[in-house]
Image: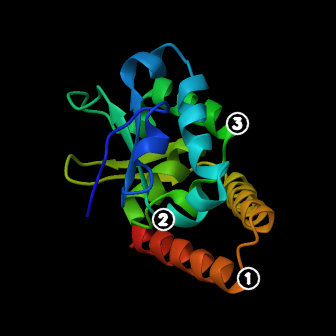
Amino acid sequence: MEIIVSDADGFDRYAGSADLAVVLFTRAEIEAAAVGSAVERLMLFSDVEENVRKYEGRVALMFEGYDSDTRSLVEIPECVAFFRAVDREWSYWLHFLVARPDALNLAFLLLADVRPLSLNSDRRTFAVNDPDQLTNLFARLFNSMNTLHTNYGVPDLANRRRTEIVLRSLLQARG
């Protein structure tokens, strides 16, 4: 597996040979609430048909600069606000994020209003405050994925397969 680190300007040079893309959000851009660069980087995946197909389930997120913070990212108001601001501009997470329970669960927890259930250092757990908010979030994110698929002619069978992968991964996150 080849992983290449690039910014938006170098993406086209390396996109063809990378197997996984890691989108890095820096602490500086998070604390400044500067979402423009993050949205620009994410649009490189969704604005080119070849990238839509190549990077399905092959994008991971990294929040740089919070390793020494004992809180979970969903407990850091700046991270939550930043991710929600990015999501208002680009919401194709379900198509692109790696289908790992931790990756998809993190996106949902950052986008929903949550409260801690357990702050055990080994495994922190959270509950969504409003089930209707979660239902609406699911609907919105699946609608975004479906719109992306429609715009790029992704076959219905591939759409159903991706939906099943995402749902299975999210169910594993609950277990």
Residue 135 spot, x, y in % from top left: 71, 61
Task: Read off the residue under disc 2.
Answer: 57
Say which element carries label 3.
helix
Residue placed most toward the observer, 51 or 75: 51
**Amino acid identity at mark 2:** Gly
| Residue 111 as seen in the image, left or right of residue 144 | left
Please report contact status of discs 2 and 3: CB closer than 8 Å, yes or no: no
Residue placed most toward the observer, 131 or 41: 41
| Residue 24 as seen in the image, left or right of residue 127 | left
Q: Residue at 20% across / 46% down in the picture?
A: 121
**Amino acid identity at mark 3:** Glu
Residue 31, which numbered label?
Answer: none
Say which element carries label 1.
helix
Q: Vertical placement of 150 versus 119: above or below?
A: below
* Residue 56 shows in this picture: no
| Residue 158 as seen in the image, left or right of residue 15 | right
Considering only order in the chain, which callout, 1 or 3, is on the residue closer to the N terminus? 3
Task: Read off the residue under disc 3.
Answer: 89
Q: Vertical placement of 168 versus 55: above or below?
A: below
Residue 173 spot, x, y in % from top left: 41, 67
Picture quarter containing residue 146?
Answer: bottom right
Q: Residue at 23% across / 32% down in the picture?
A: 67
Considering only order in the chain, which callout, 1 or 2, is on the residue closer to the N terminus? 2
Task: Read off the residue under disc 1.
Answer: 156
Residue 157 spot, x, y in % from top left: 68, 86
Say which element carries label 2.
loop
Q: Residue at 37% across / 35% down in the picture?
A: 63
Picture quarter containing residue 24?
Answer: top left
Query: Which quarter of the rendered picture does the C terminus lie within?
Result: bottom left
Mark 2 to mark 3 CA distance (whole Å): 20 Å
